[in-house]
């Protein structure tokens, strides 16, 4: 199978679980077919393109700020370097009486409805994927149900990668210069990320065996990558996926829509039994996520927090 295997969610067998296990030990990526979100793709891309190509005023009406980190942003830093992208971060609640601080723009029509549908479907699918990962790792299928049982802190995002600087020249004073990647290398802080990507390409994963490898677009599939928490839960058996997006060619642009599956705020993260002597000490999820997002807005003079901070000295 390919270094980044394609897994049919409706036809899981021993060979598929083995392919996931091998991929997660090496680079943390696989593609998922028959994932159930196929009927959402066209509408999702329609509203995504309409939003990012809409007016500056409409986007700035939902500008993301430290006191409400949802909405639009065009100057995010990764590893202290500014990315060549603009984003819209969002979340939704399943409860009819639930209230959110989610800012929604006036345009395009249907934006909130389409994104809410995608968010809720991503949450449901992520639970299935976590059970698949547990099976692949050789532990109980429901071993990681509990951290997500009551509440979750998941978020979703729309990404737009243009070939030029997304930040207007008049707003660049005092902002770090654009880095050398559309998205600089990093791991995701949560459990798993589900990613819809268009057919442009540019996503790369770091393989322990082969260095940087492409995660190619494949029609009808969803990209899955594991995050920092799976690395800790499996006590290092699985490798949090180090990844990046290469710069867009002149005149091209790329869209993607990641769903970041994250546990409830009260969760404590520690290795599961059955993976050997613990290599990580327990830590509160809320402490970790806070440390990971603080440097999105400004260069704080050091890289963001990593799970290695919690590694037990040998």
Image (cartoon, rainbow, N blue to C red):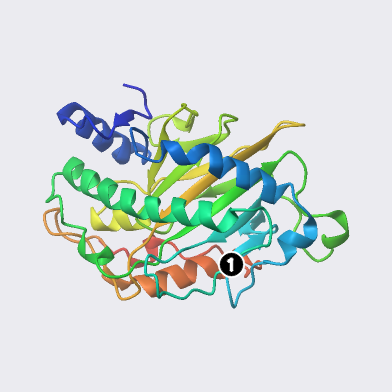
In the rendered image, the residue lying farthest to the right is 170
Mark 1 element type: helix
- Tell me which residue sits at (37%, 27%) in the image: 3
Q: Is residue 81 left or right of residue 128?
A: right
Crowdedness near tag 1: few (<14), some (14–19) or many (≥20) residues, C-alpha within 10 Å:
many
Residue corresponding to mark 1? 295
In the rendered image, the residue lying farthest to the top is 1
Q: Is residue 119 above or below residue 27?
A: below
Q: Is residue 220 above or below residue 129?
A: above
Q: Name the quadrant containing residue 270.
A: bottom left
Q: Picture coordinates of residue 148 (x, y %)?
A: 28, 64
Nearer to us in this view, 292 or 34: 34
- Tell me which residue sits at (69%, 56%) in the image: 107
Location of the N terminus by quadrant is: top left
Q: Is residue 1 left or right of residue 88?
A: left
Q: Is residue 258 left or right of residue 54?
A: left
Location of the C terminus by quadrant is: bottom left
Please indicate, yes or no, whether residue 171 appears anywhere in the rendered image.
yes
Q: Picture coordinates of residue 11 (x, y %)?
A: 22, 29
Q: Picture coordinates of residue 244 (x, y %)?
A: 54, 43
- Tell me which residue sits at (74%, 46%) in the image: 53
Q: Name the quadrant containing residue 301.
A: bottom right
Q: Picture coordinates of residue 208 (x, y %)?
A: 38, 36
Please indicate, yes or no, whether residue 181 appears anywhere in the rendered image.
no
Q: Name the quadrant containing residue 276.
A: bottom left
Q: Is residue 237 left or right of residue 57?
A: left
- Tell me which residue sits at (13%, 49%) in the image: 139
Nearer to us in this view, 310 or 248: 248
Looking at the rendered structure, the number of numbered marks drawn on it comes to: 1
């Amino acid at each position: 199978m390919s270094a980044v295997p394609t897994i049919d969610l409706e036809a899981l067998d021993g060979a598929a679980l083995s392919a996931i296990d091998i991929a997660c030990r090496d680079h943390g990526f696989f593609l998922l077919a028959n994932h159930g979100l196929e009927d959402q793709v066209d509408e999702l891309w329609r509203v995504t393109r309409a939003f990012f190509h809409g007016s500056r005023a409409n986007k700035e009406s939902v500008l993301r700020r430290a006191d409400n980190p949802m909405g639009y942003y065009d100057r995010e830093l990764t590893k202290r370097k500014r990315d060549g992208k603009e984003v819209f971060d969002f979340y939704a609640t399943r409860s009819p009486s639930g209230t959110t601080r989610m800012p929604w723009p006036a345009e395009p029509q249907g934006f909130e409805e389409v994104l809410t549908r995608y968010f809720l479907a991503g949450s449901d699918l992520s639970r299935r994927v976590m059970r698949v990962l547990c099976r692949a790792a050789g532990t109980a299928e429901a071993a990681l149900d509990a951290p997500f049982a009551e509440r979750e802190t998941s978020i979703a995002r729309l990404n737009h990668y243009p070939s030029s600087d997304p930040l207007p020249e008049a707003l660049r004073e005092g902002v770090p210069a654009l880095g050398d990647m559309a998205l600089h290398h990093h791991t995701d802080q949560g459990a798993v990320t589900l990613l819809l990507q268009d057919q442009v390409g540019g996503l790369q994963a770091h393989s322990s065996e082969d260095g940087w490898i492409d995660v190619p677009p494949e029609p009808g599939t969803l990209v899955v990558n594991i995050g920092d928490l799976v690395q800790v839960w499996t006590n290092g058996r699985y490798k949090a996926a180090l990844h990046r997006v290469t710069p867009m060619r002149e005149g091209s642009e790329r869209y993607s829509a990641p769903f970041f599956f994250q546990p409830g705020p009260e969760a404590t993260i520690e290795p599961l039994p059955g993976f050997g002597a613990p290599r990580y000490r327990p830590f509160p999820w809320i402490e970790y996520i806070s440390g990971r997002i603080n440097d999105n807005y400004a260069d704080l003079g050091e890289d963001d927090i990593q799970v290695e901070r919690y590694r037990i000295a040998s």
